[in-house]
Amino acid sequence: MTQKRPAVLSGKTIKTKTDCGALYITLNKEKDELYETRFVLGKAGTCQNAMLNTLGVLFSILIQKGIDKDKLARTLKKHFKGINCGTPFMFDGQKYSSCLDLIGVTVAKEIEENGSEKRTS
């Protein structure tokens, strides 16, 4: 059974420009741990946007069901890094080869930062 979503979550949304439109990566937390991800690209109704929305929901389900977050971070860094769609872009001084590349790096970094804080306290 899926947990009932809290009415209020804290988090952040990262926005960057790509050749396919604006990419929004939303990372919401509950009790300082990643709880929900949302990815939006460009305009509503595009196939790319639908796939990224679905990916965000899938990540959220995995996280809420208790997937090993360290393993998820390692998997994202290994398999999403370098996915190339032919339209690379710059974000925060780094070059990314696709939206999936940036999503993988961003979600993995969020998990690792939370994990290291939790393990040291």
Image (spheres, rainbow, N blue to C red):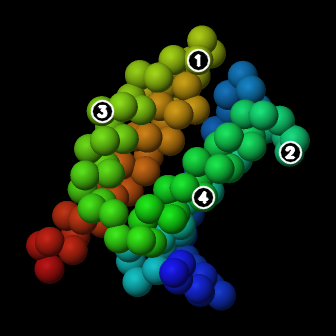
Looking at the rendered structure, the secondary structure element under dot 2 is loop
Instruction: Count the labels in the image.
Output: 4
- Estimate the spatial distance between the alpha carbons at disc 4 and disc 2, rounded to whole Å: 16 Å
Identify residue type, mark 2.
Ala
Q: Earlier in the sequence, mark 2 or mark 3?
A: 2
Q: Earlier in the sequence, mark 4 or mark 3?
A: 4
Using a 10 Å C-alpha cutoff, classify the residue at mark 3 as few (fewer than 14 neighbours), some (14 to 19) or many (20 or more): few
Task: Using the image, tell me which numbered label, if any, was put on residue 15.
Answer: none
In depth, the one of 62 and 104 nearer the eye is: 62
Identify residue type, mark 4.
Val
Residue that numbered label 3 is attached to: 78
Q: Earlier in the sequence, mark 4 or mark 2?
A: 2
- Estimate the spatial distance between the alpha carbons at disc 2 and disc 3, rounded to whole Å: 29 Å
Q: Earlier in the sequence, mark 2 or mark 1?
A: 2
Q: Earlier in the sequence, mark 4 or mark 1?
A: 4
Residue that numbered label 1 is attached to: 85
Residue that numbered label 2 is attached to: 44
Q: Quarter-wise, where is residue 69 in the image?
A: bottom left
- Residue 3 visible in rendering: yes
Identify residue type, mark 1.
Cys
Give the foreground label among 4 and 2. Answer: 4
Q: Are marks 4 and 3 in contact (CB under 8 Å)?
A: no
Residue 39, given in percent of the width and then of the height, sits at 63, 49
Residue that numbered label 4 is attached to: 57
